[in-house]
Image (cartoon, rainbow, N blue to C red):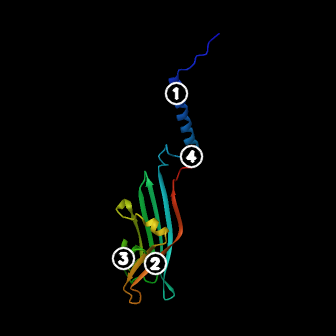
Amino acid sequence: MLAAIEPRPAERYVYRMKLYVSLAVIAVAASGCNIIGGRCTYDVRSFDGVGDAIQGGASAATAQVNLSEQRGSIVRQTFVWTVTGSLKGHVTSASFKDSQNPSVVLLDLPVLGPDRDPILQGTADSREGATVAGFHDILVAGRGGIELITDAPSAPAVVIPITTVNASGWVRPFCS
């Protein structure tokens, strides 16, 4: 009769480690997480907002903004804005501000020429050197606004407060 051969402790250790590694790989593959393919290595969050500046009971300017951020293996922040309204042709400068500190310009927003339809429209991207860090927290807190400086004596400065349409916290796409 053959005698059972007892594996040595070192062999049992190696066998267990192989088993644990195999189970971990199977779990990651079965979960749908694409960490192995490099797609599950960053987080994203976003904000969509709108605002309306009322002057004399009517809308003088309307704003739409979008902020998207990525952190992790991909780092990027992009702020997009569009402002339209009856102040077209009267706006001389514009900026994004925090209502808690209105004397500080966080981002200058270029005014489009009189031949262009919106008053303002543009994008600020951190990959192109723009600094938009902290905008998400300001916007979500309801403190963000676009200030328009005009040549109209009745409205030399108009602030468009931005309200939340949609805001998401950090999520990891491509992972379950």
Residue at mark 1 = 13
Name which quarter of the figure residue 91 lies in.
bottom left
Q: Residue placed at 50% from the left, 24% from the top?
A: 10
Q: Is residue 48 found left or right of 4 in the rendered image?
A: left
Question: Judging from the image, what secondary structure is the residue with disc 3 in?
Answer: loop
The CA span between labels 3 and 1 is: 66 Å
From the viewer's perspective, is the residue at label 1 or at label 2 nearer?
Answer: 1
The residue closer to the viewer here, 24 or 10, is 10
- Real-space Cα separation, disc 4 to disc 2, in angstroms: 43 Å
Q: Considering the image in quadrants, where does the N terminus appear?
A: top right
- Mark 4 is on which residue type? Gly
Q: Secondary structure at mark 2?
A: strand
Q: Quadrant of residue 144?
A: bottom left
For marks 4 and 3, give the CA distance.
48 Å
| Residue contact at pointers 4 and 2, CB within 8 angstroms | no
Label 1 residue SS: helix
Tag 3 near tag 1, CB within 8 Å? no
Identify residue for label 4: 32
**Tag 2 residue:** 160
The tag earlier along the polypeptide, 1 or 2, is 1
| Disc 2 packing (10 Å; few <14; some 14–19; many ≥20) | many
Density class for disc 1 (Cα within 10 Å; few <14, some 14-19, many ≥20) is: few
Label number found at residue 103: 3
Label 4 residue SS: loop
Residue lying farthest to the right in this orientation:
1
